[in-house]
Image: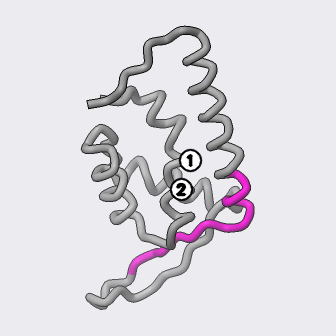
Amino acid sequence: MISKPLMAASTRTIILTILARQEDYGYNIIQKVKEASSGSLAWTDGMLYPVLQRMEMDGLISSQWKNAPDRRSRRYYRITEKGRRERLTELEGWRDLWAALARLGEALPAGD
């Protein structure tokens, strides 16, 4: 299981990466994260929506209410140009951190 501090630190980058592919709505973002992490990241509505709201206030994403095919109204989020730049900066930071850990001689697990 991924620690809460590490999960919190990676949340914005993960959301921006998902939205860089296509716009999406909250519940579907939660499901994509769960699937991609094989369940290691267990996000909840109560955790995700405040982050999305903050990211929208920061200009990293925008949102729009749309009717889904099942006629339910959903709020769809999309990445902004500022969000695309922020995503690249954050990904570079994660790569630098990973490289620093490797240089420090940490035996990085290969994964299961």
State the extent of the magenta-drawn residues as a range: 74-86
- Residue 13 lies in the magenta stretch: no
- The local secondary structure at tag 1 comes to helix
Q: Position of residue 29 (x, y in %)?
A: 39, 60
The image quadrant where one finds the C terminus is top left
Q: Position of residue 68 (x, y in %)?
A: 35, 86
Q: What whole-number distance in Å separates the C-alpha atoms at marks 2 and 1? A: 6 Å
Residue 40, picture quadrant: top left
Residue under the image location 38 percent in, 50 percent down: 46
Specify whether 72 is left or right of 99: left
Q: Residues within 10 Å of mark 2 (few under 14, many from 20)?
A: some
Residue 27, picture quadrant: bottom left
Specify whether 101 is left or right of 112: right
Residue 44 vertical placement versus 104 (above, below):
below
Residue under the image location 49 percent in, 11 percent down: 106
Residue under the image location 54 percent in, 35 percent down: 9
Q: Are marks 2 and 1 in contact (CB under 8 Å)?
A: yes
Residue 95 or residue 14, whichever sits in front: 95
Q: Amino acid at mark 2?
A: Thr
The image quadrant where one finds the N terminus is top left
The numbered dot on residue 13 is 1
Q: Residues within 10 Å of mark 1 (few under 14, many from 20)?
A: some
The numbered dot on residue 17 is 2
Specify whether 30 is left or right of 101: left
Residue 103 vertical placement versus 56 (above, below):
above
Q: Position of residue 47 (x, y in %)?
A: 41, 47
Q: How is the image coloured?
A: one colour
Q: Position of residue 73 (x, y in %)?
A: 38, 83
Residue 94 vertical placement versus 11 (above, below):
above
Residue under the image location 67 percent in, 67 percent down: 80
